[in-house]
Image: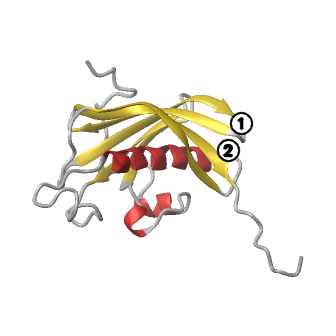
Amino acid sequence: MPPQAIYSLDNLDFDKPVFTLEDIRKVNPQRFEMEQLTAILSVDREGNGLIGYKDITPNEFWVRGHMPDFPLMPGVVLCECAAQLAGFYARKYELLAGDFLGFGGMEEVRFRSPVFVGDRLLIMVKMTKLRPGRRAEFAFQGFVEEKMVFSGVMIGVPIHRDKPQTGDE
């Protein structure tokens, strides 16, 4: 039996997102094929979480090859959607240091139902632990319509861009 939803699925207004794709781009560095969010619907600063979504289109980079004639969203891409949502929260509200936010690990990941082209994937994340500037853990869940399709826990860690070497040193 799937766990209870982190946040209620009721009263979500897809016509009035809190953050649009353009707003997300101001915080998240991913571009082109790696952009895995459409918009953010709700932010819970007190509870350290948020709800966003991704509309799955026929133009996704994985459609042609996963699987031919039966495009099934890869589990790793589902996890990337959740990571980008958690990363947005961590970067927007300056929870971790670094130039980028990276995966530090994943636990308890379960894929419960497939996600297909034409689906709207609703994603929820909630921070469960924080070591300020060093590491954040987030519970995550994804839904298509009202059915939970995946869940788990991820660890986000800061990634520092090294100062480029000029050869003079």
How much space separates mark 1 and mark 2, taking CA atoms? 6 Å
The image shows residue 61, relative to residue 102, as above or below, that is below
Q: Position of residue 54 (x, y in %)?
A: 32, 52
Q: Position of residue 88 (x, y in %)?
A: 53, 49
The disc, 1 or 2, on the residue closer to the chain's N-terminal end is 2
Q: Which mark is residue 132?
A: 1
Crowding near pointer 1: few (<14 within 10 Å), some, many (20+)? few
Q: Are marks 1 and 2 in contact (CB under 8 Å)?
A: yes
Quadrant containing the N terminus in the rendered view: top left
For residue 96, the mark is 2
Q: Please indicate, yes or no, whether residue 30 appears anywhere in the rendered image.
A: yes
Amino acid type at circle 2 is: Leu
Quarter occupied by residue 65: bottom left
Q: Residue at x 27, y 54 (%)?
A: 55
- In-front residue for pair 161/120: 161
Instruction: Residue at 53% x, 38% y: name it.
Output: 105
For the residue labelled by badge 2, is the local secondary structure a helix, a strand or a loop? loop
